Amino acid sequence: DIQLTQSPSFLSASVGDRVTITCRASQAIYNSYLAWYQQKPGKAPDLLIYGASILQSGVPSRFSGSGSGTKFTLTINNLQPEDFATYYCQQLNSLPRTFGGGTEVEIK
Amino acid sequence: QVQLVQSGAEVKRPGASVKVSCKASGYTFAPYYIHWVRLAPGRGPEWMGWVIPRNGDTKYAPKFQGRVTMTRDTSINTAFLELTRLTPDDTAVYYCARGVLKEGGWPSLDPWGQGTLVTVSS
């Protein structure tokens, strides 16, 4: 199984900050088959990014994704109040599909 | 719009089974895989498997093999997850999600159902 390790697991940030979340894989994820999801309390996860760097339709351009192989990052520029949530990466390269443990972004 | 609506919360005793439904609307049900993912307090999401509505084929995560059954009823555009021999460790929110290939062939899960809380307690 491909293990995904997200860091940090928790971060405290202010509106307007730039934050970066890292997702490291135990094996290379080919074809950049990596997605990022955002989950707000009491809600289902929403797709943010697929193909490691492609924004889902409707997602603000302050979100961006990058990376390949075993290291991927999600960056949020100019953090907005509605961005405070938990973020998960998922690999869709091999079975079983696996997720990172999550990064909770809290208001400082 | 594309939507997945799940059945309501369940409370079960250890050793019991639970069956969760996921009704699809707003798109053609058959071609799109339905994945099941659970999220327990303090743990990251766990992928449980998928069912292919077109033919009923399934793929399960090894952790759940032998305890999980995923089925579908195309006449009502609904997928089902059944989990047996429940323990308190199975307490979680269970989600269904549609597997899609975005333009360019990129796989992802979109959208997700609203989630079903399953509580296992004596």
Image (cartoon, grey):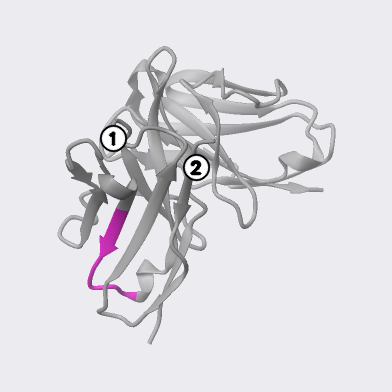
Quadrant of image for the C terminus of chain B: bottom left
Name the residue at 72% across, 39% down: A83
- Label 1: state its secondary structure: loop
Name the residue at 56% across, 26% down: A73
Report, in whole angstroms, how far the alpha carbon at label 2 lies from the one at label 1.
Answer: 14 Å
Whether residue B49 is visible here, answered yes or no, is: no
Whether residue A92 is visible here, answered yes or no, is: yes
Name the residue at 26% across, 72% down: B17
Q: Percent from the top left, x then y, of residue B113? A: 48, 49
Would residue A48 appear left or right of B107 to someone viewing this image? Answer: right
Q: Nearer the viewer, residue B70 or A34?
A: B70
A6 over B64 or under it: above or below:
above
Would residue B72 appear left or right of A28 to someone viewing this image? Answer: left
Residue labelled with disc 2:
B3
- Label 2: state its secondary structure: strand
Q: Nearer the viewer, residue B29 or B112?
A: B29
Q: Percent from the top left, x then y, of residue B70? A: 24, 52
Q: Which of B73 and B15 is in front in this view?
A: B73
Q: Give the range drawn in magenta.
A: B80-87
